[in-house]
Image (cartoon, rainbow, N blue to C red):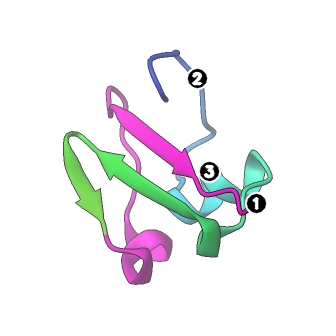
C-alpha cells in the first residue's frame, strides 16, 4: 500500500482495508494494480496477495 508492504487478514475488500486504517471511503481514491477502483465497488473489490494499492486521501483546507 503506497509502496509499503502490509498484511491484511483474508478475506478482505478495499472497504475493509480502508476501515481498518481509519479512512473515510468518501474521502479517498484507490488504485489497485494500476486501475482506479470506483468508490461504488469498494465493498465488493476483494484484495489478493500481491495486490499493489495506492490510496490518496483528500484533505480540505482554506
* Label at residue 6: 2
* Numbered disc 3: secondary structure: helix
Q: Tell which of 55 and 12 is nearer to you.
A: 55
**Outermost residue to the bottom:** 40
- Residue 5, above or below 54: above
Q: Quadrant of the C terminus?
A: bottom right
- Residue 41, above or below 24: below
The answer to if 33 sits in the magenta stretch is no
Give the residue displayed 33% in from the left and 31% down from the top. Answer: 52
Few, some or many residues within 10 Å of mark 2 (<14, 14–19, 20+): few
Q: Are marks 2 and 1 in contact (CB under 8 Å)?
A: no
Mark 2–mark 1 Cα distance, whole angstroms, equals 29 Å
Mark 1–mark 3 Cα distance, whole angstroms, equals 26 Å
Few, some or many residues within 10 Å of mark 1 (<14, 14–19, 20+): few
Give the residue displayed 63% in from the left and 39% down from the top. Answer: 9
Q: Earlier in the sequence, mark 2 or mark 1?
A: 2
Q: Does 33 sit left or right of 58 as displayed?
A: left
| Bounds of the magenta segment | 38-62
So how many labels did they put on this image?
Answer: 3
The answer to if 47 sits in the magenta stretch is yes
Q: Which residue is mark 1?
A: 61
Viewer-nearest of labels 1 and 3?
A: 1
* Numbered disc 1: secondary structure: loop
Give the residue displayed 63% in from the left and 59% down from the top. Answer: 16
Q: Earlier in the sequence, mark 3 or mark 2?
A: 2
Percent from the top left, x then y, of residue 36? 26, 58
* Label at residue 17: 3
* Label at residue 33: none
Q: Earlier in the sequence, mark 1 or mark 3?
A: 3
Q: Tell which of 27 and 22 is nearer to you.
A: 27
* Numbered disc 2: secondary structure: loop
Amino acid at each position: 500500500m503506497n509502496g509499503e508492504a502490509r498484511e491484511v487478514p483474508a478475506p478482505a475488500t478495499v472497504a475493509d482495508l480502508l476501515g481498518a486504517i481509519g479512512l473515510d471511503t468518501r474521502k479517498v481514491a484507490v488504485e489497485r494494480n494500476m486501475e482506479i477502483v470506483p468508490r461504488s465497488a469498494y465493498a465488493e473489490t476483494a484484495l489478493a496477495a500481491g495486490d499493489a494499492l495506492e490510496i490518496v486521501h483528500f484533505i480540505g483546507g482554506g
